[in-house]
Amino acid sequence: MRRSPPFRPEGVSVLRFGLLVLGLAASLWACAAPEPPSRAPRDDLGHAVRLAAPARRIVSLSPSTTELLFAIGAGPWLVGRTRWCDYPPEASAVPSVGDGLRPDVERIAGRRPDLVVLYASAANQSAIFRLAQLGVATASVRLDRLDDLPRAARFLGRLTGFGSRADSLAYAFSHQLDSARAALGAAGTPRRVAVVVWDRPPMVIGRGSFLSDLISLASGRNVFDDLRQPSATTTIEAIAERDPDALLVLGNTVPAFAARAEWQSVRAVRQGRLIRVSGSEFERPTFRALEAAASLRAALEEIPQP
Amino acid sequence: MKWILLGVLALGAVAVAVGVGSAGVPVADVGAGLLGRGDPTAVAIVRQLRLPRALLAFLVGGSLALTGAVLQALVRNPLADPYLLGLSGGAGLGAVSAIALHAPGPWGIPAAAFAGALAAIVLVYRLALVTGTVLDARVLLLAGVVVSAFATALMGALMALSPAPELRNAFLWLLGGFDGASWQAVSVFGAYAAAPVALMVLAARSLDLLALGEEPAYYLGADVERLKRALYLSASLLTAAAVAVSGTIGFVGLIVPHAVRLLWGPLHRSLLPAAFLLGGILLVMADAVARTAFAPLELPVGVVTALLGVPVFVVLVRGWTR
């Protein structure tokens, strides 16, 4: 019975060899990985967005991302937008693919996009899945508040190859936002505002919406800023109790509810203090927010101090 | 005894509904507010918002329950409810069209909803008479279903195709609620409802005869055809007004009549007034919960009627089968 010769030295060398191979493989992997983004960026739903090259056929499915893409310089690469995308004016030259939420996947695919930018919503999950099956990259962007803008700009800049322009815009906007907020402390008592977006049932804007940001930048205060939602159904009684100095309504015309008897228990309605704002800068968070806030501030200052 | 209980409950429900709300008005201020004294905001909240809202909820709840009881007797089907005759579809189509066309004025949407409901009623009656001059309950039921489906489809097409973004909120109106309550609404609805309510309550004896079957009722002296037409029309017209002031509120008109039958028997002479009172009480309480449970947020009142009513009904059915 001979015992097999000791095997240890060779075993060690095998181990060393293995390590060497692993090390080589690792360095090869590192070289083979696609250039600048060594990791695929993740969108606001947590999905990795894998693009072989900066996107050059982009479909944008929300008015705010369409405007943002134009702002960072990616506008010429847009091949599709929603029917609601109306800013900048050049956007109307881009073919519309219809609605942005629960979009028409077939029409989008017909534009042969390499990137589809969506609003991050559960309503879009099925479209995201079907686009992925068609081999189209999707990026979901949650753009509700003004503080979401710099992040969204950097993210879209990275996907479209306009990173440096997007970064500087994002930096400048954050800076302006910070200094505008810092300057607010000096202002007097804030005018208290409720944003009524619908009357039957009454719906108001909460702090989840950029409109709440706009009001505070206009040195006002949204009386419903304790609600986390972007918008919520409430009662006339709750509006009357919070007793805002003015109601903010979107659109050009005097809303019909102002004439109704039950709304007269709201002091701002009784006194006719309805601030009407119109324009797309009040419909979505954009880099134009600071100008929107300035015009809103002028309107708020016409309301007499309580 | 039963009437005292229902009366006390009704007054209590209205008192509670006036006493609570998303604004925390203390009880003393509610009393002062009712008399028009004290803080003007509290006075406005109590007198202009809570009181008309509670009264409107009571009238609408009572009307829906009464209508449900009458229709269940007429078509002899326990699943009958006030929206049976295509009313919710017609009213919804009217309201959505008004929103799409930017109908002006505070009464734009209710008037359009009422007109839509009336159109649906006319269409359903016309369809039901296709088979002859006799109103056949089965044909009437089917006509109601198809007219409602057609109106709902048109409404869906309008909502999908119209460029008005505010139409996205139109479905919230369809869920129903009393946010439109005002003294105007209470007085218009009250004045309007008086005649159909009286007609239905006075027809109680004929309805009891009808429960024996149409032929026996005829031999016992009821003018069955005239009775059926008058009751269908008053039930439809009453529901159309209820939909116009408060949207479609489900469940009250279906369950309250059954609950009253379980509690106090099927005789219409007592069933109809009791259903009116109990329907009113349920809807006033449901609206109070809808306003306050998550204040300042508001729940759709139809959600609350079902959440409150189903457990009560289950308990009643259990007691009855035992």
Image (spheres, rainbow, N blue to C red):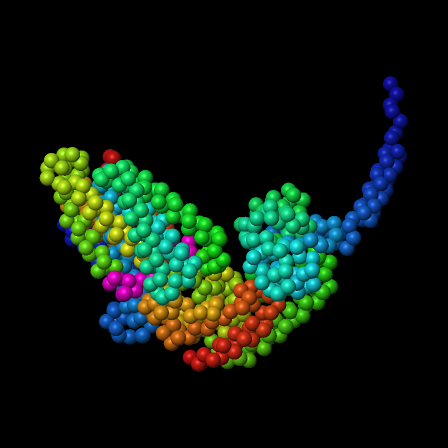
Spot the residue most to the top.
A1
Q: Quadrant of the C terminus of chain B?
A: top left
Q: Is residue B271 magenta?
A: no
Residue at image coords 10%, 39%: B221
Q: Nearer the viewer, residue A21 or B41?
A: B41
Question: Which residue does the image show at 66% across and 57% down from the upper left?
Answer: A78
* Percent position of residue B175, x then y: 38, 53
Give the quadrant of residue A15: top right
Residue A32 shows up from this direction? yes
Pick the residue in front: A70 or A302.
A70
Count of marks overlaid on the render: 0
Looking at the image, residue B162 sits to the left or right of residue B271; the answer is: right
Q: Is residue B291 above or below residue B47?
A: above
Residue in the picture at 31% in, 74% down: B39
Q: Which residues are magenta?
A: B169-188
Q: Is residue A237 visible?
A: no
- Give the main secondary structure of the magenta stretch: helix
Q: Is residue A222 above or below residue A57?
A: below
Residue B77 relative to residue B3: left or right: right
Query: In the rendering, at what x and y percent does residue B214 appear?
Result: 18, 36
Identify the residue at image location x=39%, y=59%: B98
Residue A180 screen position, x and y as percent: 60, 74
Who is closer to the viewer here, B157 or A136? B157
Q: Is residue A280 left or right of residue B49?
A: right
Rendered location of residue B180, percent (x, y): 34, 61
